[in-house]
Image: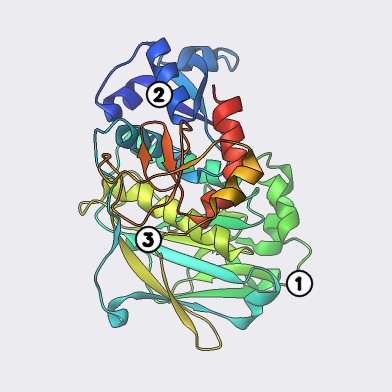
Amino acid sequence: MPTVSIGRDRLFEALGKTYTEEEFKELCSRFGIKLDDVTSEKEKHLDKGAKGNGEIIYKIIVPDHRSDLLCLEGIAQALRIFNGQQEIPTYKVANISTKSMIKMHVKQETCSVRPYVLCAVLRDVTFDTASYNSFIDLQDKLHENICRQRTLVAIGTHDLDTLHGPFTYEALPPSSINFVPLKQEKNFRADELMEFYKSDLKLEKFLHIIENSPVFPVLYDSTRTVLSLPPIINGAHSAIKLETKNVFIECTATDLSKAKIVLNVMAKMLSEYCERKFEIEPVEVIYCDGKSYIYPDLSVYNMGVSLSNITGAIGVPLVVDEERSRPNVPQDPPAVLVENVGVVGGAVVGGATRVHNPQDLEYLQDSVSGAVGGAT
């Protein structure tokens, strides 16, 4: 299961409360995550011969299917809800007309290499150094886990104010793609980049995903500025900075379901820093066959499930929740409630999980074994 490293003091600030190490371990255990290790930035840097600032770091193990817990913002929010300190946030898509939406046009050639692209916009974002670093770390954690090392989904984030829509998602011969990649100063052809990054310890492991394809996926703005060469590298032109105010998120994918989850997690977690908190601007994605889709999809729905199916699969005693007065539980039709397991499906109450989301049902067996076995 993934391990997330978080500064203790910043986490406690986000929780609005300080804990002893034992108290926080107990809270994690009740919720269904695990405080695996406690270290410090100073210790972390000793092996590298650099000076750390001595900040205490909590290493927290989270369930595989809880992509929203891969960052401080997600863990802090989930624990606040679990503790009854806040209501479940209502995320919303900005109410703008389709005509006013930013457009992403998808070319037919992408079908052969990486067929899907989903996008969203965050307006009036305010970063500080800590939130900016958390934003970068979340991308890395998503890439390592649900994105399966970028094979299923690759995330690109851009300073929207440096770009001009509408955008296009294309697949072209690598020799015809030219741009300055992130953290570089010279122009490269895409085929030259494949050779250049073979000596890069971080990026080399992603080259195999497209290097044998006759065409490479690439995203352009209306001036033919390259946003990214997914799943390898973003362009330097639209790089996110601390001063960035408007963020354009694009997820290219071979797995549409995973891409929807990844886009939602990125957009939801970052929307905490928007002037209009928890509001996300939609983008219209238009395919070559004329079909169009608006992302992100933040619709909420319930899913019924047979109690016998769940108990037969996981062997954990379950009861049907018939109480309608517990705090932080939406007043919806009865759902299966997993008692004394701290894994969140829809809403969390005490040590219980209300199961509505198909993804939660798909991973319920792993989640329960992780919460009951691996995170105690």
| Percent coordinates x, y for residue 30 in the rendering | 44, 25
Q: Secondary structure at mark 1?
A: loop
State which quarter of the image contains the N terminus: top right
What amino acid is labelled 3 in the image?
Answer: Val
Q: Circle 3 is placed at which residue position?
A: 300
Q: Residues within 10 Å of mark 2 (few under 14, many from 20)?
A: some
What amino acid is labelled 1 in the image?
Answer: Pro
**What is the CA distance from the residue labelled 1 to the residue labelled 3?**
40 Å
What amino acid is labelled 2 in the image?
Answer: Gly
Q: Residues within 10 Å of mark 1 (few under 14, many from 20)?
A: few
**What is the CA distance from the residue labelled 2 to the residue labelled 1?**
44 Å
**What is the CA distance from the residue labelled 3 to the residue labelled 2?**
32 Å
Say if mark 1 contacts mark 3, CB within 8 Å: no
Residue at the extreme left of the image, as rendered: 275
In this rendering, the label closer to the viewer, 2 or 1: 2
Say if mark 3 contacts mark 2, CB within 8 Å: no
The foreground one among 30 and 215 is: 30
Disc sitting over residue 7 in the figure: 2
Disc sitting over residue 214 in the figure: 1
Q: Residue at x 35, y 68 (%)?
A: 282
Residue 54 sits above or below residue 362 on the image: above
| Percent coordinates x, y for residue 349 in the rendering | 35, 37
In this picture, residue 33 sits left or right of residue 245: right
Q: Earlier in the sequence, mark 1 or mark 3?
A: 1
In this picture, residue 146 sits left or right of residue 344: right
Residue 51 in view here = no
The foreground one among 328 and 263 is: 328
Q: Earlier in the sequence, mark 2 or mark 1?
A: 2
